[in-house]
Structure formats: C-alpha cells, structure tokens
Image (cartoon, coloured by chain):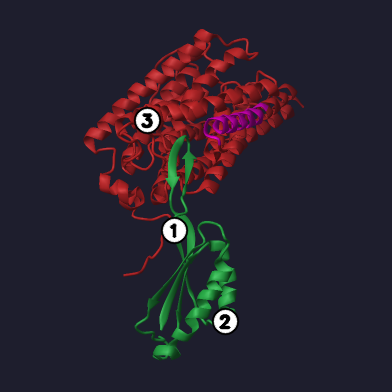
Amino acid sequence: MENDIVNLQYALDTFYFLVSGALVMWMAAGFAMLESGLVRAKNTTEILTKNVCLYAVACTMYLLTGYTIMYGGSEGGIFPDAWFGNSIANATTEEVLASGGDTYYSGASDFFFQVVFVATAMSIVSGAVAERMKLWAFLAFAIVMTGFIYPMQGMWKWGGGFLDAAGFQDFAGSGIVHLCGATAALAGVLLLGPRKGKYTKDGKAVAIPGANMPLAALGMFILWMGWFGFNGGSELMVSTIDEANAVSTVFVNTNAAACGGLLAALLTAHFLFGKADLTMAVNGALAGLVAITAEPLNWTAIPATLVGAVGGVLVVFAVIFMDKIKIDDPVGAISVHGVVGIWGLLAVCLSSNADATLVGQLLGIVTIFVWVFVTSLIVWAILKAVMGIRVSEQDEYDGVDLSECGMEAYPEFVSSK
Amino acid sequence: MKMITAVIKPFKLDDVRETLAGIGVQGVTVTEVKGFGRQKGHTELYRGAEYVVDFLPKVKIEVALPESMVEGAVEAILNSARTGKIGDGKIFISDLLEVIRIRTGETGDEAI
C-alpha cells in the first residue's frame, strides 16, 4: 500500500513536471508571435528564424553542458563540479521505493522542465536586438548564453549555490530567467546601437510601428497561458493536499498579477498619451507576470494583483525612459523583463515569505546583473570584433529578411525565373 | 474617347459602381491609393513617440468612355460619391488616344 502511494505520487509529480514543461515550451511560440507582431514586415522572417533557432540552440547546449553546470555544484558553492556531458538520469523503481518518496519525480522530467526555462531566458534577448542584428552573431551568442552564462547564475540559486545559501528568494525566475535575459539584451543593445532613424538629431524618438497587432496580442495570450506552467510548475510538486493547494494559489496569483499589470499599464498609457495603447497593454500583462514570478505563492490574490499593477505602471515609464536615453528596444524586452524583474525580486520582501530579506534579494539582483552583464558584454564585444554584430545600413534599409534569410515574410509580386 | 479618373472615399465605391452600371458603363478599374488634398491628416502615438499620418486611404476609379457618355458619368460619380464633408475627392478627365481589347484586337469605341 505504502509502495502504491509512492508509485502514484512519483507518476503524478513527474506528469506534472512534464505538462508544466510543455506549457513553458509553448511560451516560445508566444515570444515568436509577439516579436513578429511588433517589428516591421520586412524583418519578420528573420525574427522568426531567430526564435525558432534559439529554442533549438538552448535545448541542445543545456543538454551538452548547461544542465550539468547548473545542477552539479556543491551546496553554497560558486563553481560547478562538472562542466560537460549529459547528466540526465532516471532513478530506478528500487531506488525510488528505497528513498521512501524523497525521490518523487523522474530525472528526465526535471531536465525537461529546466531546459524550457533556458530557452525563455534566451528569447528575451531576441526582441531587444530586433531589426538590425546579424542572425549568426545572435545564434553564436545564444550558444554561450545557454551553455554557460545562464547555467552559472542558475546554479548559484536553484542549483543550491551561494545565492541560495544567502537566502536569496526567486520562486520561478524573475531574476534567474527574466533579469538574466534582459541584462544580456542590454549588453547587446549597448554595443549594437539603435535602429537607423529611430532617434532624431535632437534626441526625439521616432515611431516605428509594428506590422501586425493581431500577432502581438496572440503572443501575449500564449505567453500568459505558458506562464501557468512557468510559475505553476515551479512549485515542483502537486501530489499532496498542501501542494495541490499551493499550486492552485500560484495559478490564481499568476493570473491576477497579469490582469493587474495589463490594466495598470493601459490606464497609465491612457493618462500619458490620451489613447489606449495596445502594445503597452500587452507589455503591461507581461510585466505583471514577470513581477509575480519571484513570489507567486505567498500572498492572496488581491496583493498579487497589486504587485502586477506596480509592474504595469513601471513598464510604461521604463519604455519611455529607455527611449529618452536612446536605448532602442523594439519590443520593450529590457523594460518588461529587466526593470520589472528587479521589482519582482524586491516585492518578495513584501510577501508573507518569511525567508525573504532585503539584503538577500539585493545580493541576488546585483550578482545576477553583474555576472550576466559583464560576461555578455565580453561575448558581444568578441563577436563584434570577429564577425560584426550589426547588418550593413543598406541591409537594414532593405530588411533583414532579405539579407539574413533570403526570404520575405509577406511576399508579393514574386515570379519564377 | 476620354479617360475619367476619380479619387473617392473608399466606402463610396459600391455606390459609385452601382450608379455607373445604371447609366450603362461596362467596366471600371479600381485601385487602393493613399492621398491628401486640403483634407489634413492626423497625429498618432506609438509607445509615446508621435508620428503623423498625412496620407489618407482613398479609392481610385478609372473608366474609359466614348465622348457621348462623359457628361452622364461625371454626373453619376458626383451624385454618388459626394458626402458634403471635406475629403470627398476629385474627378480628372483626360484624352484617351486609343483603346484595344486584348482578346479580340478590337479598337476604338468598340473596344470600350
């Protein structure tokens, strides 16, 4: 009877990991749709190519090196025990039963759940560098980011490293995934420069409207749905009454924060611009989701809504501020994932999470930012020197669909030779 | 023979087409265009950055007609395309040197 329960819990929790992982994988489609909706038609094929390729690169690099780095370290440590190799291992039935339920999910399901988070972090970068970066430079960066940069800082918290030992709290990755991705994006954008014609000589931002609002809205909804796996799965277990309750709370809070973020951003944009800006509403929902990701459990739904709402207000001002300092981010990735990622990590201190400390959170924020920014800057700089990271002015004008992919997204007037 | 080119508001296309058919016009060519006359555009905001939309969507209709039908067609277009509000459009009349039907090779008034 005892064994039956262990069997059942193992199966249920493994299933839960797998389904949650599949939901997070679906976020890759969300990013692809969101980004292709917010860039111009002539750059659509290229950003889609970036998105489909980075998912494959992320999964492969994490398999080759990342997972081993991230989960092979010693407790409280800085360096992993191993750097290469496929370390996925399922426990046998005997081992699981002998553990009395301590081992309650399959090793492969753990890898699957983790690998999709890496892809999410990497896809944050693709939006910020859109419309002017060389495709292969981006993919080269993705190899290093997903195989090394992300796993190292992931190890320091989720792999039991020194950030975890210091009490840094990050439930599902406001820091480890979102701030990480946004910081890598920031480093890239600083070396890349803004799109031609984005800023006038006197520093005013020129509007470069996205080509497809339906895709952008679709992307937001896909990301929202995937986030239930992102936050929900990060509870890591569902097969007891306590855990099922916790997971339910996480789903409710995640949804509430997204709603709060969307409405707050919509209202903020309305007061600032006098119009209901759809792209700001979309960014607001995502900001709400990022904000709650560090702590989707330890509040009730109304405070969770407010946490998301603060994120929604922040993101509108952040987008405007980025343009003021001439950091060109076509989709607002740095604002949504970086600025609000930091808010999400700080907000944990306001929750009923008794283990959160301001010092712990600040240590996490600074560590992640400095590590990712410095290593990313180095990689981007090497790529810039060796192969160049920006397309030529003519290619940028004609559209990167032609220069990087040789294929238009919306072809017209084509004829065979 | 004359070529009548009319730039009208897009939602007036069906009215104009029906009225022209009513006076015996056999065929028209229609293009979606953008343009402005004395009707000004407007300002929009995208993520806080202002941009101006000067060009407004219009529809251009081109009809080839024998001399005798021109006055009637102009009357028809004026009545069906007019709203009385700014931006109603314009009618241009130009001389047509030749018309040829591709299928049969007919020319002149028979080809219209």
Q: Quadrant of the N terminus of chain A?
A: top right
Q: The disc numbered 2 marks a residue on which chain?
A: B
Please state which amino acid type lies under the numbered disc 2.
Answer: Ile
**Above or below B21: residue B13:** above
How crowded is the residue under tag 2: few (<14 C-alpha within 10 Å), some, or many (20+)?
few
Q: Are marks 3 and 2 in contact (CB under 8 Å)?
A: no
Please state which amino acid type lies under the numbered disc 1.
Answer: Lys
- The reply to whether the magenta stretch includes residue A258 is yes
In the foreground, A103 or A93: A103
Q: Reading the chain from its start, which is encountered first: label 2 or label 1?
A: 2
Q: The disc numbered 3 marks a residue on which chain?
A: A
Q: CA distance from mark 3 to mark 2?
A: 61 Å
Residue farthest toward the right in the current orientation of the protein: A1
Q: Which residue is mark 2?
A: B23
Residue A2 relative to residue B74: left or right? right
Q: Secondary structure at mark 1?
A: strand
How crowded is the residue under tag 1: few (<14 C-alpha within 10 Å), some, or many (20+)?
few
Q: Which residue is mark 3?
A: A327
To the question of a shared chain for discs 3 and 2, the answer is no
**Above or below A288: residue A331:** below
To the question of a shared chain for discs 2 and 1, the answer is yes
Q: Which residue is mark 1?
A: B34
Q: Which residues are magenta?
A: A253-274
